[in-house]
Image (tube, rainbow, N blue to C red):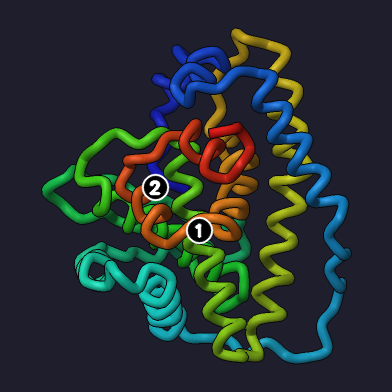
């Protein structure tokens, strides 16, 4: 999660404001959510239990794996990736027996971000690290430019995708476990969160919820990773591409 608006600020924003910020309308959102549901229905069900045992990574190894994945994914931009990795503060939250929590704070264009997260050595934790580093890289790449939240979350989900691709390319035993954790998250984004956004689209004055950004960002990140060049993807991290640009580039809208 990127640093969302404060609670008091959320009270003054509505669904209409969120749509306007992203140059979206309810009909387009419904089309995206319907496409998301169709894609989810066409995917095979994830196995409930894997035969192989997950080889837990220690914290340093998990971070280095994310760094390697992002360097492979955006190989023309390794210097800013390395710089962001080295200078971003990474603070572990002690949350035993509690739900996972992660947040990336934007400390301004002259500073480096701060990532707060918890870690239990499970596959879902590795995806969270990749997600938050995606946020941190977007913050540095955009150099203080305002980036709408759907675009921020697209960058974070692209970070998760980079980790999955890296694990597959390396033939790592962890790959199946990472995919299983990713699919469990997918059920949340394509299920309850999608349904809540769908319902909210009928209420223009509904109070803004940051969670609305996730279903659309999840779907568009997948489309981007399958259809777009790495250099165009970098323009998304730089904040040079809007949601409308993404929809056109991925063929959702005609050029």
Numbered label attached to residue 236: 2
The CA distance from mark 2 to mark 1 is 10 Å
Q: Which mark is residue 216?
A: none
Question: Residue at (74%, 60%) from the top-left corner?
Answer: 184
Above/below status of 162 relative to 24: below
Instruction: Give the quadrant of residue 241.
Output: top left
Considering the numbered disc 1 on the image, is that residue within a helix, a strand or a loop?
A: helix
Give the residue at mark 1: 158
Contact, mark 2 vs mark 1 (Cβ under 8 Å):
yes
Q: Residues within 10 Å of mark 2 (few under 14, many from 20)?
A: many
**Residue 186 location (% of width, % of height):** 71, 54
Q: Point out the residue furthest to the top here.
A: 205
Q: Residue at x 49, y 22 (%)?
A: 23
Q: Quadrant of residue 230?
A: bottom left
**Helix, strand or loop at disc 2?**
helix
Sequence order check: which comes first, mark 2 or mark 1?
1
Instruction: Out of 42 and 213, give the one closest to the viewer.
Output: 42
Q: Residue placed at 30% from the left, 48% from the top?
A: 238
Residue 56, percent from left and from top: 58, 86
* Residue 71 picture quarter: bottom left
Determine crowd level at label 1: few under 14, some 14-19, many 20+ residues with C-alpha closer than 10 A: many
Q: Is residue 91 left or right of residue 126?
A: left
Residue 106: x percent and y percent? 28, 45
Q: Nearer the viewer, mark 2 or mark 1?
A: 2
């Amino acid at each position: 999660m990127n640093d969302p608006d404060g609670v008091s600020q959320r009270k003054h924003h509505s669904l209409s404001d969120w749509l306007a910020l992203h140059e979206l309308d309810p009909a387009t959102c419904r089309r995206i959510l319907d496409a998301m549901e169709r894609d989810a229905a066409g995917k095979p069900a994830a196995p409930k239990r894997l035969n192989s045992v997950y080889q837990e990574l220690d914290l340093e190894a998990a971070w280095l794996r994310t760094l390697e994945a992002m360097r492979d994914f955006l190989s023309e931009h390794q210097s800013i990736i390395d710089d962001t990795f080295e200078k971003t503060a990474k603070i572990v939250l002690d949350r035993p027996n509690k739900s996972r929590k992660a947040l990336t704070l934007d400390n301004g264009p002259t500073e480096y971000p701060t990532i707060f997260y918890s870690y239990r050595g499970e596959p879902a934790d590795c995806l969270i690290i990749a997600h938050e580093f995606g946020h941190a890289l977007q913050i540095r790449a955009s150099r203080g430019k305002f980036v709408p939240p759907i675009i921020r979350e697209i960058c974070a989900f692209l970070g998760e995708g980079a980790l999955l691709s890296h694990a597959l390319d390396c033939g790592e035993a962890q790959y199946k476990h990472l995919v299983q954790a990713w699919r469990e998250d997918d059920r949340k984004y394509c299920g309850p969160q999608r349904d809540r956004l769908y319902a909210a689209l009928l209420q223009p004055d509904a109070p803004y919820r940051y969670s609305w950004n996730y279903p659309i960002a999840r779907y568009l990140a997948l489309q981007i990773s399958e259809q777009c060049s790495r250099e165009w993807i970098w323009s998304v991290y730089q904040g040079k591409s809007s949601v409308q640009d993404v929809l056109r580039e991925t063929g959702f809208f005609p050029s």
